[in-house]
Amino acid sequence: MDDKIFYTYLLLTENNTYYCGYTDNITKRYKKHIDGCGAKYTRANKPVKIAYLESFKTKSDAMKEERRIKKLTRIAKEHLVENFSKLLPNLYNLAQEITLSVY
């Protein structure tokens, strides 16, 4: 049985914009974004933190959530971010640890 975890994440950039993606290794992927080796968008808009993080058992589910989040309005994305610590406290703590460990 494969216990791999997939993540959908939302990064807040230095330009106060959001970038959404998915990965199976959130620490490694976030570091790539910070180092300028991630997505083209984050090379031009440097991330400052993982603003939202959700885990899934399948890559397909993570990709579906990524598509759903990308379609949200900015206000809806902000709502996700504002409620992140209350709704998913363990993932919120993980996101904070990863963000701090990269800097």
Image (cartoon, helix red, strand yellow):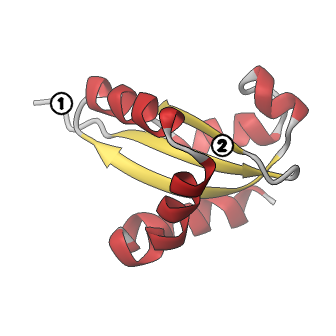
Q: Answer yes or no: do the residues labelled 2 and 1 have beta carbons within 8 Å?
A: no
Question: Which labelled disc corresponds to residue 13?
Answer: none
- The residue closer to the viewer here, 1 or 11, is 11
Q: Does label 2 or label 1 sit earlier along the sequence?
A: 1
Q: According to the image, label 1 marks what residue? A: 2
Q: Residue at x 61, y 36 (%)?
A: 29
Residue 54 in the image: state x and y as whole percent.
Answer: 39, 51
Residue 7 in the image: state x and y as whole percent.
Answer: 41, 41
Q: According to the image, label 2 marks what residue? A: 30
Residue 14 in the image: state x and y as whole percent.
Answer: 87, 52
Q: Amino acid at mark 2?
A: Tyr
Tell me: 88 left or right of 45. Answer: left
Tell me: 35 left or right of 95. Answer: right
Tell me: 47 left or right of 98. Answer: right
Q: For numbered disc 1, what is the local secondary structure?
A: loop
Q: Amino acid at mark 1?
A: Asp
Distance from Cα at disc 2 to Cα at disc 1: 23 Å
Q: Residue at x 44, y 33 (%)?
A: 66
The crowding category of the residue bearing disc 2, from other C-alpha atoms within 10 Å (few below 14, some 14 to 19, many at least 20), is many
Q: For numbered disc 2, what is the local secondary structure?
A: helix
Residue 16 sits above or below residue 69 on the image:
below
